[in-house]
Image: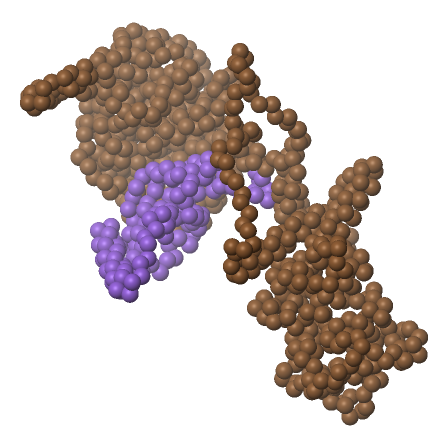
Amino acid sequence: MNYMPGTASLIQDIDKKHLVLLRDGRTLIGYLRSIDQFANLVLHQTVERIHVGKKYGDIPRGIFVVRGENVVLLGEIDLEKESDTPLQQVSIEEILEEQRVEQQAKHESEKLKVQALKERGLSIPRADTLDEY
Amino acid sequence: MFRYQSLEDCPLDEDEDAFHALGEEDEDIDQFNDDTFGAGAVDDDWQEAHERLAELEDKPATTGEQEDGTVTDEMDLLGDHEENLAERLTKMVIDNELEDPAIMQAVQTRLPVQHPGGLNSSIWDGSAVLRRIRGPLLTQEMPSVSVLDYALPQRPPQARDEERDLSERALPRRSSSPVIGSPPVRAVPIGTPPKQAAMPNFNQQILCPKPVHIRAPMQQRYPAPYGERMSPNQLCSVPNSSLLGHPFPPNVTPVLTHLQRAQLLGGAQAGRMSPSQFARISGLVGSPLPSMNPKLLQGRVGQMVSPASGFRAFFGAPPPPAPPSAQQQQHPPCPGSHLQNLRSQPQMFRPDTTHLHPQHRRLLHQRQQQNRNQHRNLNGSAGDRGSHRNSHQEQMQKDPYANLMLQREKDWVSKIQMMQLQSTDPYLDDYYYQNYFQKLEKISATEEMHGDGPKKERTKLITPQVAKLEHAYKPVQFEGSLGKLTVSSVNNPRKMIDAVVTSRSEDDETKEKQVRDKRRQTLVTIEKTYSLLLDVEDYERRYLLSLEGERPALMEERKQKICDMYDNLRGKMPSQDRPSDDHFVQIMCIRKGKRLVARTLPFLSTEQAADILMATARNLPFLIKKDAQDEVLPCLLRPFSHVLYHLPLGTVTSLLQQLANLPHSATALAPANLHLSAVLQNKFGLSLLYLVLSRGEELQSSDAATELMQDNQWTELMLMATRELLRIPQAALAKPVSTPSNLLALFSRYVDQQKLNLLETKLQLVQGIR
């Protein structure tokens, strides 16, 4: 708040650990190093965290530069509370496998739904521009 | 291309052959030939460049040695140097011809992407030198940086070309993306880990030790715009230099993996390193420190220091005393920490920014066993409170990447954000913010008046007010042109499409269309009236702000607008005597219309307001039916009650009449008065009735009592009302918004005791019964 009272700015968030949710559904966790007026972000020591059910897995990604328009939300991570999670961390392979299974199940149900609708003469047009999250 | 042209001339049967021939010829063409893309495309006079560099290195030799004399302890030394650096750097900044921070920032952000951070580079590839160029500070002085050359076309090209090219020798320069200013393409994509598992063996805060995309690592270039400037001699000396406040313990020496050695060799093509120097480096293979260290330091040094002047400062440093053990746990040098010291900005002290990702605590422990000898707990877990007590400097050291974004850049972003807040009329542009703060100020003002509590400093953002400039737009005129050229721009748009509005004829329309159009008309009327209303509501504020002379004009405007509003509401029909409520009813059917009426009423004159009331009462059952979904009618109660208090009895009576829907003349006693019963069963209706009755009672009690008692109309109406009230079962009666207290007295005048009791219970007129 010392820059501009009454406004919101990412400047106060620099060099802090953040969780960023992207429009394609990815969750990134990293240290916010730099911003600009479009809220493009530079994340350092980024980890992509995949959540499936109660499990999660971290994939280290290095440095990310995120274009501002692709950010849904971001928030500072409380480092003290970070480890207090009921979620269970698993290895990357496992979480990717879980994710694949989940995606498959979703895909199947989606297919059934579309099929059922088609039988009734309805169709839901797939809007590709919708955000994934 | 000439070949292709000739193809068309060939007869058909020869096409194939010709084509084949072409194909073969194409294969022979080296797409990435040297002449086009490679070294042949530019001058590479490395010898000349080398000599120039050597000159540069020699120059600051003396200055560097002087500065070292005052060294007492590591950190001080660092501080001193950095202060000097700071001065030099700031001087450079001021002189910076390229004021555009966009370029600077672009340059800056590009580079870190290119060269991943120091901690990571041990994993990734040591050859990626940590050239975290501190943006504008160094662009001036680092002419040889290739990226800068792309970005800064003003740079004298030739002299730089050689140096740049030397660094890129093996990579075809033009094979990089065509976008000017983009970083050169790497043979190995950024993010590729080194071939060998470079296990970082010192305390590092690493969130992601090993990137997932494991690709075959190739020989990476040793691109070193800064590296060129440092001889391997420096590489050796720097890590142990206390100048940098380097956290490495003295026993740790920089290590070059064979990969990096190869790269150094590659760099040595440039003639930057003599074989003897190189041998010295390889001789340093010792403790398994990640080999990126020298690069780290290189990069840091390059970053920190203007190449011309600063290098010597480091070179001349005598080997430092052993760094305090505390520093062993420090992370590799962070450019930011030093620059942090340079800048005397108000630091936002962030504790625990360096907490490790929990996953990597294991790794940390491993390292800690080697180097750590005590307390500084870098765990991210909640247990660590010690870090809070750390000194500011140590905090920053814990996060070696802190302040990658300079204060200057932060200010720049803030400046942009502030610029967006500039406005000519903040009340118009930023209404809610202004109002909010006015409210806050009022509250704090009242608080202050009441008690002498500590006044909370509410820092208010002062948005700069820009004077409104009147621009008279003059279309562009070209000299020497015949006539006026039509140049269309934002200010002067040109009509591109001739869209003609055709009004439909009445016959063609169907009933539904007519209805729809009518509704649209009503909506438009509502919007127009709303604009007028907002203007009128704003007049008070404008009045206060305006000058004396302008005020009458303002008042006039206001009056006119109020008249317009009323006309809009009632429907302008100057010829008729306003017999039709239709227009008004239409407005009242729409939720926004009702709210509009509620807001407009206070501004209307008494007659006008009474008129509105009448119209409402007349059509109340219809409106009630239409309001079933919105339930917005009760919003009208307050303004209606205000109006009522100004009405004389005659009006009130007629109002009641309207409510009861009785024609003036006859008093047909229908068994049930549908109009009234509908009214009674609606919350708004009942409340309105109560209000009217209450007003009547007030007038009765206040005025000359005799006059009223003789008022037959009133009496009749009262009786009718009471009859109706009694008739309707209690369950069907609506719950009024408020029950005026004088109703009991009112009823007592007209009804006998029995009925009075009934009424009491039914309507819960007595306070006790709830």
Looking at the figure, which quarter contains the N terminus of chain B? top left
Q: Which residue is more in the foreground, B534 or B583?
A: B583
Q: Pick whichever, B665 or B452, lies toward us.
A: B665
User: Which residue is at the far bottom?
Assistant: B754
Point out residue B196 in the picture as x, y percentages from the top left corner.
18, 35
The residue closer to the viewer here, B583 or A80, is: B583
The residue under the point 58% across, 66% down is: B630
Q: Position of residue B95 (x, y in %)?
A: 51, 16
- Compared with residue B94, is residue B119 higher up or lower down, i.e. above or below? below
Q: Nearer the viewer, residue B588 or A36?
A: B588
Q: Residue B679, located in which quarter of the rendered image? A: bottom right
Please report the residue visible at 65 percent of the width from the left and 40 percent of the height from the top.
B426
From the viewer's perspective, tell me whether residue B570 is left or right of residue A8: right
Q: Residue at the location (31% across, 9% down)?
A: B49
Establish if A16 lies above or below B148: below
For the C terminus of chain B, the image quarter is bottom right
Q: Position of residue B303 (x, y in %)?
A: 39, 24
Asked whether residue B303 appears in the rendered view, the answer is yes
What letter labels the chain drawn in brown?
B
Residue pictured at 75% horizontal, 46% vertical: B539
In the displayed structure image, the side of residue B344 where residue B337 appears, left or right? left
**Residue A21, horizontal then vertical, whole percent:** 39, 48
Is residue B566 visible to the viewer in this orientation of the structure?
Answer: no
Q: Is residue B211 above or below residue B715?
A: above
Q: Which chain is purple?
A: A
Name the colouring of the figure: by chain
